[in-house]
Image: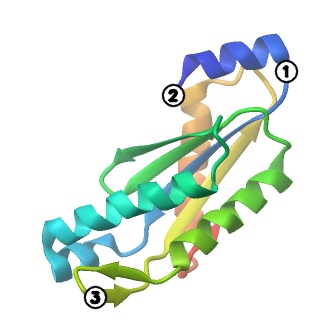
Amino acid sequence: METRTFVRLERNGGMVCVMYLDIDDFKIINDTLGHGGGDEVLIELGRRLASVLRPTDTVARFGGDEFVILCENFGGVGDAEQLAARVVAATTKPWDVQGWFMPVHVSIGFAVTDSATTDPAALLDDADTAMYLAKKVPGSMWV
């Protein structure tokens, strides 16, 4: 994660939110459409995520079917829940992948801090843990 974010947090105050996203049942997409179809889903998910973020937010594919969003100057848990709702709305719109119309659901975990002394890796781990809790409830959920 960006160390500069925590330097700015220490200097300017405010809050930082880390969101960890995972595509539910991505293996089924790859098995059905092949890796090319899976790649199309990953690219489109990146576009859809970028479309609901602020220009100052950062989204990155973290590996496999996982993405991380880093938001600075955040208003707290309420803002994180609003962003998660926008992400779910953007991802549950119909997906046309190689002529197949399919639902794509994501599970989202987030962690918010106002402390520059927070270990970035620990914050990411907290968001990851929350995401796995969200995965226990099927159908695009967040924790």
Q: Earlier in the sequence, mark 2 or mark 1?
A: 2
Whether residue 143 is visible to the viewer of this picture, yes or no, is no
| Residue 114, label in figure | none
Type of the residue with mark 3: Trp
Q: In x, y percent, where is residue 65?
A: 35, 58
**Circle 3 residues within 10 Å: few <14, some 14–19, many ≥20:** few
Q: Position of residue 29 (x, y in %)?
A: 27, 77
Nearest to N terminus: mark 2 or mark 3: 2
Q: Is residue 58 visible?
A: yes
- The amino acid marked with disc number 1 is Gly
First in sequence, mark 3 or 1: give its number: 1
Residue 69, position in %: x, y? 56, 45
Q: Could you tell me which residue is drawn at 58 percent across and 64 percent down? A: 133
Q: Amino acid at mark 2?
A: Met
* Drawn side of residue 15 relative to residue 40, left or right: right
Q: Identify the mark at residue 13; answer none if there is no mark.
A: 1
- At numbered mark 1, what does the secondary structure look like: helix, strand or loop? loop
How far apart marks 3 and 1 lie (CA) works out to 47 Å
* Circle 2 residues within 10 Å: few <14, some 14–19, many ≥20: few
Residue under pointer 3:
100
Q: CA distance from mark 2 to mark 1?
A: 18 Å
Above or below residue 26? Residue 118 is: above
Q: Estimate how packed mark 1 is, as few (under 14), some (14 to 19) or many (20 or more) residues with alpha carbons within 10 Å.
A: some
Q: Is residue 119 left or right of residue 73?
A: left
Which structural element holds mark 2? loop
